Amino acid sequence: MRRLFKDPDELRKSVFAAEITHRLIVSSSEYYVYEFAPAGRYAVRILTSYAEADYPELSQRRRYGHTLTTASQFLFAAAIAHTKLKSFPEYTAEQQALVERWLRGKLLGPHIKFKETSRWTTEGDGVRGPTSTARVSGVTVNCCNPLRYNSGRVQIDMALMAGSILFNDQEGFESAIKGYVDVIDTMRADGSLPYQTVRGNAAIWYQNLGIQVLVMAAEMAALQGIDLSSYKAPSGATLHSAIAFLARYMDQPSLVYGYAAKNINPWRAGNRITDPDDHRYQFATWKLPRLQGDGASFLAWFEPYQRRFPNHPNISLMSDVVTPIAERGTPRSKMIQLPYPFRRANATGGLFNDYSGTITSCVFKEIP
């Protein structure tokens, strides 16, 4: 069992941090699986603290797109946590009503359900048209990804999908489905996501991030009887194509250089990056298979995908790419093991990350 965490009030200064999302995911999941009351109390405290303060604020103009996507990660996790905690005896009817009013206002409000038309969704994108430049965190970078065609768009619509299911809002659900379709429709025939793979040194990283949110959206839709995973882009590509592309390009990073050369807002520092404009250094090839310090995984999407498509060629394709990385010196205890065995979830607590909204082992059953 993972340790519980410090006072959620201390986290107000970093409302959109992955840390608070991880803490909510882990504590609500530990209650859901083990009925561990302290974990349930902690998760309820997070939900009620943010509901009472009506956080996170979604209308920050300076970095509206970033604010909205990172807040959506937290709200997506909050919607799932609320559902998992409904049976907790200490989660009172008054508290549940408070949290539902807060979630309804955020998820079905003007920024997530009724998305604004602004420069974040209308300006030149640098992918289909000329690449422009902008100042980001004090650094001049190639620009810009529109919110309507990248993983951020699906992240927002994942939160909307969860809210529309929670509150039975058909209009919101249809809007969320459109988010998935709009992003898939941009996919090239080889499975690459254009607005992810132009990110320079982070091209493979963002391809994986796009897959994470697309898989989770497809899972939620599947539970409502809608098959998004087989939806084809005009190029003929599907979600499966995106995963096959990721595996091939993790194995041979040079294959992505042609797309990555646009260097649209690459990672600037860290992850052994010394030259941020060197699109040939694809740090995701070694970072994606490694578990994070709290046990989270950047490949958390693999578990629900594996359980829905246990015999798909992508299962062995991804496994064949990831396994040799551990054999090159990374301790297996710090690596995700693919195919992902359910017994490992029992031993380690299961897979999750800030984009998954939950520990995936808690909500997707093992396929015999």
Image (cartoon, rainbow, N blue to C red):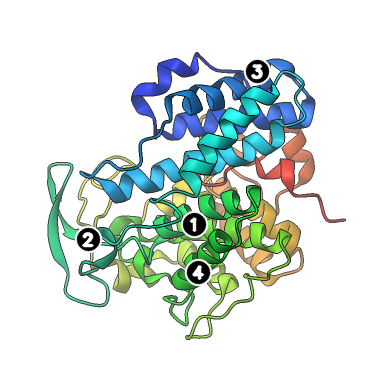
- Identified by mark 1, the residue type is Asp
**Tag on residue 178?**
4
The Cα atoms of the two marked residues, 3 and 1, are separated by 29 Å
The Cα atoms of the two marked residues, 2 and 3, are separated by 41 Å
User: Residue at position x 39%, y 30% from top?
Assistant: 15
The residue where tag 3 is placed is: 41
Query: Mark 3 vs mark 1: which is more N-terminal?
Result: 3
Query: Mark 1 vs mark 2: which is more N-terminal?
Result: 2
- Horizontal side, residue 4 vs residue 11: left or right: right
User: Residue at position x 21%, y 66% from top?
Assistant: 123
Query: Mark 2 vs mark 3: which is more N-terminal?
Result: 3
- Horizontal side, residue 186 vs residue 76: left or right: left
Q: Does residue 344 lie above or below 3 as drawn?
A: below
**Tag on residue 314?**
none
Residue 330 appears in the picture as rendered: no
Residue 200 appears in the picture as rendered: yes
- Identified by mark 2, the residue type is Arg
User: Residue at position x 41%, y 41% from top?
Assistant: 71
Image x and y of residue 29, in percent: 68, 32
Between residues 294 and 227, which one lies in front from this camera angle? 227
The residue where tag 2 is placed is: 119
Between residues 88 and 368, which one lies in front from this camera angle? 88
Query: Mark 4 vs mark 3: which is more N-terminal?
Result: 3
The Cα atoms of the two marked residues, 4 and 3, are separated by 36 Å
* Mark 1 closeness class: few <14, some 14–19, many ≥20 residues within 10 Å: many
Tag 4 near tag 1, CB within 8 Å: yes
The Cα atoms of the two marked residues, 1 and 2, are separated by 19 Å
The Cα atoms of the two marked residues, 4 and 1, are separated by 8 Å
The residue where tag 1 is placed is: 157
* Mark 3 closeness class: few <14, some 14–19, many ≥20 residues within 10 Å: some
Q: Does residue 236 lie above or below 170 as drawn?
A: below
